[in-house]
Amino acid sequence: MIKRIEIEPIPLTEGHSKLILKVDKNIIVEGFYYALVPVRGFGTMLLDKEATFAPIAASRICGMCQAVHSIATAKAIEDACNIEIPETAQKLRELISLSVRAYNHLLHHILISGNMFKNPQKRHTFIKNVQKIRKTVSSILETVGGGIIHPSNIVIGGISSPIETPVKERLIALIEEAEKLAKEEIEIFIHHIERLWKEQKLPENLGEHKLPFITSKEISNVSIKEIYPQEIFNELPLKREATNTIILINENGAETGVRARKIREERYKPKGGIKELHKLRAEEILLSLKNIKRILETEKLDKETRNKQFPTSDNEKEGVGIVEAPRGVNIHKVKVDKSGKITYYEIIVPTALNMIAIAESLKGEKVEYAEMIVRAYDPCIACSTH
Amino acid sequence: MFGLYRQFTLGRYTKAFIIKASGEASSKNNLKALIKEAFRKDLIDGIIGTSLNKKEGFVSPVFIKCEKEVEKFEPFFFIHGGQNSLLKKITQKYSFEKLGVAGHSCVLDGINKMQYFGIGSNFTVTKFTLKIGIACIGAISLEGIKCLLKEKKVKNPGFNEIFLENNKIILKNKYEKFDFSAKEYYYYLNEGCKVCMNLSSRGSDITFVPSLRNGYSLVLVRSAKALKLFENPGFSVKKAEKSDIEEFESLAKNFLKKNIETILERAEFGIPSNKWDGNRFGRFTALWNNIYAENIEEEVF
Amino acid sequence: MIYSFDNFDKEIKVKLGFFHLSSCSGCQIAFLDMFEELPDILDTVEIAYSNMLTNRKEIPKLNVAFIEGTFSIGFKHHIKLIKEIKEKADIIVAIGGCAAFGGIRRLNVGAQSPQPSHQASIPITELDYLKGKIKYVIPGCPPNPYFLYKFLLALLELNEEFLRPFEHMVFSTFASGYDILMEVVNKGLCTGCGTCICACPTKALEFSKRTQRPTFNKLLCVGCGSCLAGCPQSFKPYPQPVYG
Ligand code: SF4
Ligand code: SF4
Ligand code: SF4
């Protein structure tokens, strides 16, 4: 007999969300995960507003991957208005994205630690360790972006202030320190994940799915379709309760995020399952730090960083800004008219894309693992109810 | 009774000196010497101040990162130039360990407030190690200075220095020197400064008085840290005479009296005066009537 | 004292809860961004509820509930949550521009998929239902970690001098850079110190060298209330820090 189980809220995740599971003999037959934070209306909020406001507003979509939204919106508007941005600005933006990536993954470790440790004292010690690296990473974000949570230096046309050489040197020193700390932290994290799997006798391939993977590199060659909860659910109140839309890629689900990046960039062969996801995410922290260091060491960052051209366009051209966010592909689309006002705005966030991947991962697993599977995807509810 | 006692007008200080830099005698050079000394003694590794940009004719905030840069610094008094607008950049980007500031009392109030509450700043704001307060008789605008000079029928109202001498406010350019009485100057004061009760920058480590008397400027030392500046300094230093202190005190008193008049005038019309709303005005009157009951040092307007 | 904690005892840790209405979670993360200072504080307080940090589905009894984000009118989860918090928490602190003054959520117009009816979002300080329960408001978008740190310390030490301004702020339900123009510049109280510019998280305020005053670009303002709170002419630290 198929039972219906509802789990709400899902602790140790961002925001407020819910799981609806159809269960047969304790095994999930079908599962839906969705957001319960009211739609925040950033898409319509920006309509008929000046384009220069967009990066500031977009940053406030999410308090975790803030800068990524600002960069995506700035890119989209620059694309729509044919504004070329200086190379230095591009590099600085990449730097910011990478720091946001490390910052977010570390944040996820703090959330997940609630699952890893039964003893609060041990969790405390673990968090203390993570905080140390987060501090160094965030000071990079603060230095380059002009703020940790809502960086204000990301503007249309580039970045509002360059990084002088002495500042750069300080950042390199910081990143070297962070690298050392990160190596340790990752080891500890992976060790605890392995321990958790052993202790609770979790299956190695827990949360496996057969979906394809997608990153920002391939996203322009696929069809993207947004579906509403009203289309998926038949019963009330479900269709009026879910506040996120779901994104289909080529009429199918796909997974985006750290695993997809690894596959795309290193031709990695995925084993599947959420344990792998945890490990890859941890490893990516170090990779991001290495990339930040590479940019800092090889690029000149004290040159012109901003093209002050006023953003106007013909109201025809759809500008697209694609950024590889910590959780995957993040897209902002915009049209701007002659007076510099936004006439069309659309946002596609990675968590909306991963909704199907989460649902697929839930299938065939035991009910008690459901929350753990959801957490492994590090869903960001704030983003998905943008 | 409310009295304009020394502790109120000048604030609590431990020592008073007069200092004179080598070279041309001017109060701005004396301040520069003080800042250089702070760099040399490793009390600071960067400092913010307000500098006169002669070319553009603006007063703007500057951030000095090493002793060498002090040379180019053209301190200008009684105009603040939005000094604290630099803070964000400095605290976020440069992350200095030992920051200094040379500013008037309201600039220091801004920083003190930030340190106390933490609004609009990160942890770096705690790294301000040396606060050089500049005694201030009230800010004036560049246009105000121009008008003052025009009143004296100066055809070409250029200037590059402002300081106090002999109970007068002196404006100086390369060739000439003009003096103004407190009364003349007060008229052109910034409205906000006409209600100020902290002319001597009480919330500082050391207060520099931009005065000149035989080439010497008065400084009031408030903290032990600032005392280090006067151990074998690179400028000549003497103990301040009674008359040195009294000269500034009487000028400050003069301004304070006028300010109290303005405050009462505002109060009569129900216009808020700075730093207190209805509630805080209550505190002011309590203080006004109970000067002995409260520790004035702790009560800042 | 204005409030007392139920069963306040030195042995018992002060129980904090973090709640998320319609918001970006930034304010809660700002709390985490206290970094090394956070574990120190955790010695005296306990985070008893936070969807992000605790593995708990039920809300326990709390001493202080920090709420971020706006209340979405007619949204049944918010109604339920607010009722529950009112019952379980001794006092509420509205954290961040959204919860305190509406912040960027004031610009919300709704009409967006998939739930176009979610269109009215108001700060919790506007809810009569919570009058008296909301004790303090913390301005900022997000409030600075250092500010939060100082605030928490003050809350634990019951430092009234520190908390008083934030107690008064409960009565303002809207903030913007116009406050600076209206309350300070327009009243002839601005000295041109530039602190407000530094407090603004969006660069809506900038300093004009020509006029020696802040200029306000309303286009960029997210209504967080930092600027007026930061201006030294609005309220002051009592007593002023002593140096030595
Ligand atoms: S005040 Fe700012 S940081 Fe806090 S929830 Fe609102 S938008 Fe996010
Ligand atoms: S001007 Fe800046 S600090 Fe003031 S309310 Fe607006 S965004 Fe906040
Ligand atoms: S912070 Fe300073 S510049 Fe800004 S309004 Fe207040 S007094 Fe004026």
Image (tube, coloured by chain):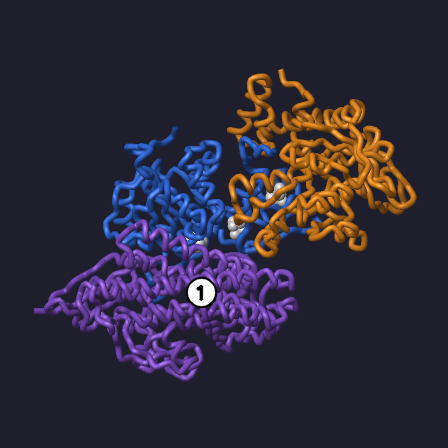
Residue located 68% across and 46% down the image:
B42
Taking C45 as reference, is A146 left or right?
A: right
Residue under mark 1: which chain is it in? A
Q: Is residue B167 above or below residue C146?
A: above
Residue located 71% across and 31% down the image:
B220
Query: For numbered disc 1, what is the local secondary structure?
Result: helix
Residue A2 is situated, as x and y percent measured from the top left of the image, at 10, 69
Question: From this viewpoint, which residue is outermost toward the bottom?
Answer: A221
Residue A92 is situated, as x and y percent measured from the top left of the image, at 56, 68
Query: Quarter of the image containing the N terminus of chain C?
Result: top left
The chain coloured purple carries which letter?
A: A
Q: Is residue A59 above or below residue B154?
A: below
Colour of chain C in the rendered structure image: blue
Camera-side residue: C24 or C58?
Answer: C58
Colour of chain B in the rendered structure image: orange
Query: Which residue is disc 1 drawn over?
Result: A102
Residue located 66% across and 45% down the image:
B100
Disc 1 marks a residue whose amino acid type is Ala
Residue A74 is situated, as x and y percent measured from the top left of the image, at 52, 68
Residue B245 is situated, as x and y percent measured from the top left of the image, at 76, 26
